[in-house]
Image (spheres, rainbow, N blue to C red):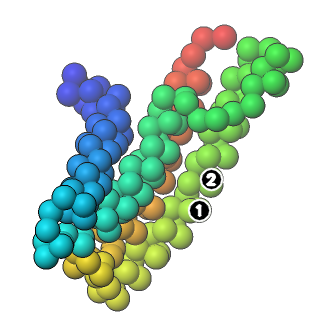
């Protein structure tokens, strides 16, 4: 169970950190190739791969923020709500996030399937385009899971 707990607590965080390190590496490699190396040496795929790695990190960050309760929110209602009403508000917000994530995730999955069937590839790297579009359904599935976990924790909470 300890391994599952670590995965549960650190999954998105680890992927985002690894992705961001890869993004920084690719960006620096691009700068090095452009300004330091001779003009004949070109690495055109680094910019493209860095951009799509950043997109993946951004979308994985959605569920990471849900897990860490770090999304931007307006807290003024908390001043006027009892603890029970505040908990109900958090449950309602999480349910709305689930609904939104399911709708966007389904749409994202449909676009992902279209990309799989079309067989389109990225211009510079030649990687399949569906790898980029897989970020949408994956991240919103994780958002649903994290929101369900939050509701579960709120319901089990005393008070």
Q: Secondary structure at mark 2?
A: helix
Marks 1/2: CA–CA distance: 6 Å
93 or 53, nearer to the observer = 53
Marking on residue 65: none
Mark 2 and mark 1 in contact (Cβ < 8 Å)?
Answer: yes
- Answer with the quarter of the image where residue 90 lies: top right
Label 2, on which residue? 99
Q: How many marks?
A: 2
- Which dot marks residue 103? 1
Residue at left offset 45%, top offset 61%: 136
Q: Is residue 148 visible?
A: no
- Above or below for 75 versus 157: below
Is there any visible trace of residue 100 in the rendered image? yes
Which image quarter is the N terminus in? top left
Looking at this rendering, what residue extends furthest in the bottom direction? 118
Q: Residue at x 62, y 46 (%)?
A: 97
* Left-right relation of 126 to 153: left
Q: Position of residue 92 (x, y in %)?
A: 70, 37
Crowdedness of circle 2 by 10 Å Cα count: few (<14), some, many (20+)? few
- Does residue 147 appear left or right of residue 85 in this picture? left
| Res. 46 image quadrant | bottom left
Residue located at (67% from left, 46% from top): 96
Which quarter of the rendered picture does the C terminus lie within?
top right
* Farthest right residue in view: 80
Identified at 27% across, 57% down, the residue is 31
Q: Position of residue 43 (x, y in %)?
A: 19, 69
The relative height of residue 51 versus residue 41 in the rendered view (above or below) is above
Q: Is residue 82 above or below residue 35?
A: above
């Amino acid at each position: 169970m300890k391994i599952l707990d670590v995965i549960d607590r650190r999954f998105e965080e680890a992927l985002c950190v690894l992705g961001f390190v890869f993004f920084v590496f690719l960006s620096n490699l691009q700068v090095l190739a452009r300004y330091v190396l001779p003009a004949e040496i070109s690495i055109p795929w680094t910019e493209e791969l860095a951009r799509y790695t950043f997109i993946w990190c951004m979308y994985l960050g959605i569920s990471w923020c849900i897990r860490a309760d770090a999304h931007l929110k307006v807290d003024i209602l908390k001043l006027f709500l009892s603890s029970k009403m505040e908990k109900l508000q958090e449950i309602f917000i999480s349910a709305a996030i689930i609904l939104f994530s399911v709708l966007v995730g389904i749409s994202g999955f449909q676009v992902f399937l279209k990309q799989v069937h079309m067989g389109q590839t990225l211009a510079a790297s030649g990687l399949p385009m569906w790898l980029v579009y897989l970020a949408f359904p994956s991240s919103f599935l994780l958002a649903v899971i994290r929101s369900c976990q939050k509701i579960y924790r709120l319901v089990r909470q005393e008070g």
